[in-house]
Amino acid sequence: MIIGYMRPSQEDEDCQQQEQMLKDICGSIVREEHSSAKKRAVLTQMLEQINEGDKIVVSRLFTLADSSRHLFELLEILEQKGVYLQAIYEEIDTEAKKEYSLRKMVGYLVEFQNEIISERTKKGMEYAKQKGISTGRPRKADENVKKAIKMYQSKKYSLKEIKESTGISKSTLYRYLEN
């Protein structure tokens, strides 16, 4: 049996993109209701019910696993059960006895880890936004910016003196002067 596994992500909250990739390949598709790394009931249930010779298909590796360690643990389970894994984006299919170059595999793992970090960052920013917390670097106080601009325009102070007096760096000062 070929089973598709989907999990919501920041870019594909309703899993429609994943479903488009999986629908023609898989006999059945299962979907987590949430994107959380914890309490992945559908994944746990699928792992309990799979049989030797089955194949799990995901659109990307980070859909299946939440970290390199988690991916390794899942691969051990699949290997013990004699189940294959296919990751469409990464062009990985453990059923095909194809050799993969180490460079290519390490590249996929680096990209996998970057996707996990990116997803967590986006979730954190969305959470902060919902709570009304602003993200990013805090803006400098207007009075300090105005003072720094006046000092700069007077041509009496060096950039070092302006920074020491106002706390406004050279790059920040120039950015405000461009506006």
Image (spheres, rainbow, N blue to C red):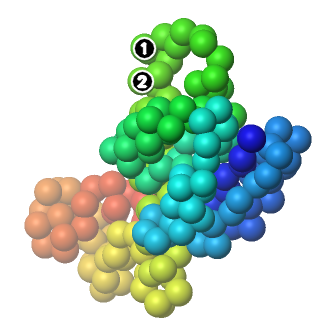
Which picture quadrant has residue 2?
Answer: top right
Determine the residue positioned at 12% across, 62% down: 161
Q: Which percent across, then down, holds residue 64?
A: 55, 49
Tell me, for residue 106, which label it has, or none: 2
**Disc 1: CA contacts within 10 A as few (<14), some (14-19) or many (>=20):** few
For the residue pair 60 and 110, the one nearer the viewer reads as: 60
Task: Describe residue 46's horizontal placement relative to residue 22 as left or right.
Answer: left
**Among all residues in the image, which is located at the extreme right?**
24
Amino acid on which disc 2 is placed = Val
Query: Which image quarter is the N terminus in?
Result: top right
Tell me if residue 30 can be seen. Answer: yes
Tell me, for residue 102, which label it has, or none: 1
Q: Secondary structure at mark 1?
A: helix
Q: Secondary structure at mark 2?
A: helix
Task: Describe residue 103's horizontal placement relative to residue 23 as left or right.
Answer: left
Q: Is residue 30 above or below residue 103?
A: below
